[in-house]
Image (cartoon, rainbow, N blue to C red):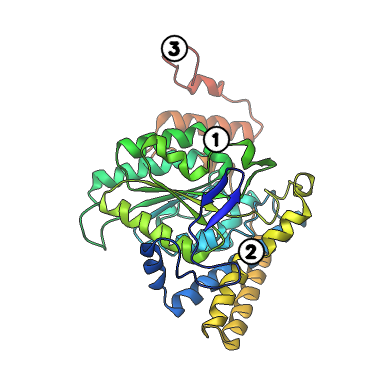
Amino acid sequence: MKHETDGGDVPLLQLLTPDGTRVTTRGTKQYRDLAADLTPDRLRAMYHDMVLTRRFDEEATALQRQGELALYAPARGQEAAQVGSAHALRPQDYVFPSYREHGVLQVRGVDPVDRLRFYRGSDHGGWDPNEHNVQMYTVVIGAQALHAVGYAMGMQRDGVVGTGDDAVDAAVVTYFGDGATSQGDVSEALVFASVNNSPVVFFCQNNQWAISVPTSKQTKVPLYRRGEGFGVPGVRVDGNDVLAVYAATTEALQRARRGDGPTFIEAYTYRMGAHTTSDDPTRYRTSEQEELWAGRDPIARLEALLRAEGALDEAFLTDLAADAEVLAERVRTETRKLHPGSATTIFDDVYATPHSIVAEDRAWFESFEAGEPPAGPVSAHTPAHPQGGTR
């Protein structure tokens, strides 16, 4: 399929049309074969995760509007990109998200209330990364790409790449938006991943807006080609097509786990809502554009396929609706019970073992919090930079 974008006609991997029809005559057979492995049960599981992700999104947005969350970054419209890619992961794979990957967390089993601890301001993170192999949300734009590559290089050194054992070989996926591709951290991550042949998949959710800046103001070439100059192959996929996303991510992860290096995936999608709940997209987007993309809704697309193939019955939908309401009620009730812990927990995990400078800084901060005169300026505990001054 060709898709008209800011860069002109660009190849776009699509396996499911907006009306829910499978694409059987175009595209790469390899991707079609990978999607063909998705049984009706697995497709229903994807649909289940997409619906619950949207219900979670609606409830979290409502909580923020009621003053229960400091901020929230909606993911409405990006469910196929997130759920499809997450279903391609193995348990031993590791995820480095930005701050909008609610669907990825849904698939990886991160508790819905834990996902909001950060937005509630009750916790510096929200969950144990090693319990789900999902790192914390990252607000510094693009920083997680470097974290992911570093982790992937560690996997190489630990010998869990290219062994030929499906239960051992692992890879990393890092998620970021189109705006993050303009950040230096992402370019640096591509350099390190390429020269080290690291097992990492760069998954760019191009929702076409870096807050209010359109993609046309960010790049002159399609984003999937960003990796070419670094020696990283890329593919652009219809981000509202859960089959195509799954297939493209599966292929990239297989390549990474074999030891064949990184891949850059651009999931071309659309952010139906605001960038965050502090944003007003009506100031820079047209209603016509929003209506166009509403007709490409990823959940409706998968539902149409399931209905057409006789894989969706009313009993399943009734149970799913009940699950969604149970989730919403729990998010409403338990999120309101979250209260900030001690601010000093920020010192707990700076180092794996006790550190004298961190202990001194903690004591200084505790005195400051208690309204007592600190023993000395905290800068006195900060090591001097070799070039002078402090770090």
Q: Which mark is residue 341?
A: none
Looking at the rendered structure, which numbered label has been put on residue 296? 2
The residue identified by callout 3 is: 387
Q: Residue placed at 24% from the left, 43% from the top? A: 157
Between 305 and 355, the one lying in front of the other is: 305
* Left or right of residue 358: residue 123: right
Q: Is residue 134 left or right of residue 18?
A: left
Q: Which percent across, then down, holds residue 231?
A: 36, 38
Q: Secondary structure at mark 1?
A: helix
Tag 2: Cα neighbours inside 10 Å, few (<14), some, or many (≥20)? some
Q: Is residue 370 something that shows in the picture?
A: yes
Q: Amino acid at mark 2?
A: Arg
Q: Is residue 117 above or below residue 261?
A: below
Compared across the picture, whether 182 is left or right of 155 comes to: right
Q: Could you tell me how far apart the alpha carbons at marks 2 and 1 are, in whole angstroms?
A: 27 Å
Q: Is residue 356 above or below residue 287?
A: above
Q: Which residue is disc 1 drawn over?
A: 182
